Amino acid sequence: MSLICLIFSVLAINPTFSQGVNFRQDDWQNVVSQAKAQKKLIFVDIYTTWCGPCKEMDKKTFTDISVGDKFNARFINYKVDAEKGFGINLAKRYNVTSYPTCLFIDANENPVYKQEGLLRASDLLKEADMVLNNQANSKPLWALDKLYNDGRRDSEFLNEYIAVRSLYSNIDNRDLVEEYVKSLTPIQYSADKTLRIMINNGFKIDGKAFDLLLKFREKAESLFEGGVEKVNRAFSQSINEVFDVALKGKNQALFDKALAANLKALPNTADRVNDKNKLAFYLAIKDVNKFSEAAEQYLDQYVMFVQIESIRKQDSWEYEKIMQNYKLGIRDSVGAGAAMYMNLKVNAKNTMARLTSAELNEVVKAFYDQVDDKVKLKKATEWAKRSLELVETPDAYHSYAQLMLKMGDKQMAMDIEQKAYDVALREKLDTHKFTAALEKMK
């Protein structure tokens, strides 16, 4: 046998000599069994066929010789489409919501580490080393906590610490992310790893990470399929968390900071989001004048402006899109998914109408409870009527009735409250609230 033939024979029977990562084309349980038998972790690439960064990893990262050598020797490698067959269940099981996502899983199917977004060869090798070192050193979270409390603050440690903490959904990493970016040199600010850490873990809106993500936003977006939405969502989540804290603490300075950050990071949607948050904040601090002004600004500009027919068309289009998945057999309508299917058939036909109606009704409730100005109360009757035009609910009728009662029209209030009772009775809902209101009006 010639030397060339011998080389090709070796390559054919021993995949660890082939270029790039060898992904098992096998049943998942066989993959798990192999991991147990060989005492290895499972590496899973979760992708979709339409994901650009996934294709780049296939073309450049997984074909890299060094990546192949390490992953073929140290892991059981598995690749799965998140939108087909078993991949749907696997993605749901490990809470995969963006692509690409790389998972390291132990032989008992417990997640060890998860990384979202494009990983180039050098980055993936570093992630693998970190996972393997953690496995070898058996450093649980408590041990990393101790190292942190003892003063460890170098960037490699902080990266590892954030990665392990990120496996626990109830742990907030924003302060650590800020420490991490402050530990970097300027040349590292725009590194893929830096941008992924910020996007995947959140950040403080008044810190360096926020400013860096703004500066290198375009590159960050390129790391994920649907990167624009992914980065926008990262900004939105971090800003909304501050809105929530400001609202609970009735902290005007913090609330103003969130408003400014929203305008800076999400200018296309900030005005509407800010105006809506002003409603909740001014109501919480009981500033009735600012609340009523914010209500008029928000509802007239963003809610009442939309024609009812447009809302109906949007609902119809969304409903047809949902039902198409069942018609094509993509989603189950007769087996385990039957209950969900029946629920959607009943409730998914007017989703936008119901949400808009409820939004209007919440403001009407606040008005009859907080506002005394008759001119402003009259304005609120327009919102009450629109709410009922969209969806007739007992609660919306009740709010309208209370509004009319506060304006001094007792007879109309009673007539409308009676409708609230009738609708509740028709829909087999509890009527006590409405009968009590009618008795009080007499």
Image: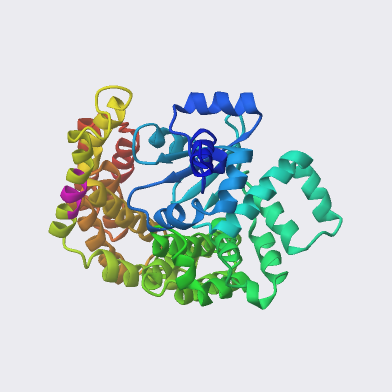
- Magenta residue check for 303: no
Give the x, y percent position of residue 229: 40, 61
For image coordinates 73% across by 63% down, the residue present is 155
Residue 322 is at least partly visible in this image? yes
Tell me: 175 left or right of 412. right
Q: Nearer the viewer, residue 294 or 43?
A: 43
Give the x, y percent position of residue 271: 38, 73
Residue 248 is at least partly visible in this image? no
For image coordinates 12% across by 57% down, the residue present is 309
For image coordinates 40% across by 66% down, the residue present is 273
Q: Is residue 325 above or below residue 316?
A: above
- Magenta residue check for 318: yes
Magenta stretch: helix, strand or loop mostly: helix
Where residue 302 sits, quadrant-wise, is bottom left
Give the x, y percent position of residue 99: 43, 51
Give the x, y percent position of residue 144: 78, 48
Q: Nearer the viewer, residue 273 or 278?
A: 273
Q: Where does the magenta region start and end? A: 314-319
Q: Is residue 232 above or below residue 131?
A: below
The extreme front residue here reads 1
Picture mark count:
0
Q: Nearer the viewer, residue 321 or 6?
A: 6
Image quadrant holding the C terminus, namely: top left
Q: Is residue 101 above or below residue 439?
A: below
Tell me: 411 left or right of 399. left
For image coordinates 47% across by 34% down, the residue present is 24
Q: Coloring scheme of the render?
A: rainbow
Tell me: 380 left or right of 238. left
Q: Nearer the viewer, residue 435 or 293?
A: 293
